[in-house]
Image (spheres, grey):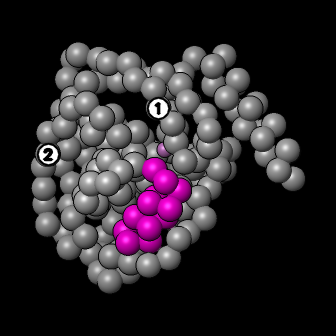
């Protein structure tokens, strides 16, 4: 396993619609393992392949708390097949928007159909933090960042802060 570099917004690869995975092979397994390693190192609770520059529909998630055993989810070609009518507002962050957080409103619960790393089909229903995380990660596969779900004003404030942080590092 290897830790990969996480792309920071605004990066053109983060805006692309990712392609479906067609081959469930060793290479896909390695990609998902690298994504998990990268996410744990960051640390974060979710990571989508486009965030490491791979334009494929693959996501990893692990909501285990510190001190609990790891509980990685490897999610390939996800499709949200149902959204609850009820919406909730929660604070979100993103490894591609370091140190930026904002309240985002989304459906409270979703149903997700996806494949595992061997191509097996699964379906899960999620609410709370998992539903939130899955929607955020599936958005990444369509080139959507959480700031794209904010008002233009709030989005611009965050993007300006990111640009300022980048200049300070340079
Ligand atoms: Ni993200």
Q: Is residue 113 visible?
A: yes
**Label 2: element kind:** strand
Q: Is residue 143 left or right of residue 164?
A: left
The quarter in which the N terminus is drawn is: bottom left
Camera-near label (1 vs 2) is: 1
**Any mark on residue 92, and which?**
1
Q: Is residue 2 left or right of residue 132?
A: right
Give 151 or 129, whichever is nearer the viewer.
Answer: 129
- Distance Cα–Cα, label 1 vs label 2: 22 Å
Most common SS among magenta residues = helix
**Any mark on residue 124, and which?**
2
Who comes first in sequence, dot 1 or dot 2?
1
- The answer to whether the beta carbon of the residue marked 1 is less than 8 Å from any atom of ligand 1 is yes
Residue occupying image coordinates x 46% and y 58%? 39
* Region rendered in magenta: 32-44
The picture places residue 50, in percent across and down from the top left corner, at: 50, 57
Is residue 26 placed above or below 47 in the rendered structure? below
């Amino acid at each position: 396993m290897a830790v990969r570099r996480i792309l920071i917004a605004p990066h053109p690869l983060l805006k692309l619609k990712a392609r479906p995975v067609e081959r469930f092979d060793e290479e896909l397994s390695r990609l998902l393992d690298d994504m998990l390693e990268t996410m744990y190192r960051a640390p974060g609770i979710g990571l989508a392949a486009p965030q490491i520059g791979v334009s494929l529909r693959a996501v990893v998630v692990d909501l285990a708390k510190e001190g609990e055993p790891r509980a990685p989810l490897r999610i390939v070609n996800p499709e949200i097949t149902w959204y609850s009518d009820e919406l909730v507002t929660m604070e979100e962050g993103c490894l591609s928007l370091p140190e930026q957080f904002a309240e985002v409103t989304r459906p409270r619960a979703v149903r997700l159909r996806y494949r595992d790393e061997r191509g097996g089909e699964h379906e899960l229903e999620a609410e709370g933090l998992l539903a939130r995380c899955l929607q955020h990660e599936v958005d990444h596969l369509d080139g959507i960042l959480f700031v794209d779900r904010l008002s233009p004003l709030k989005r611009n404030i965050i993007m300006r802060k990111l640009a300022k942080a980048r200049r300070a590092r340079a």
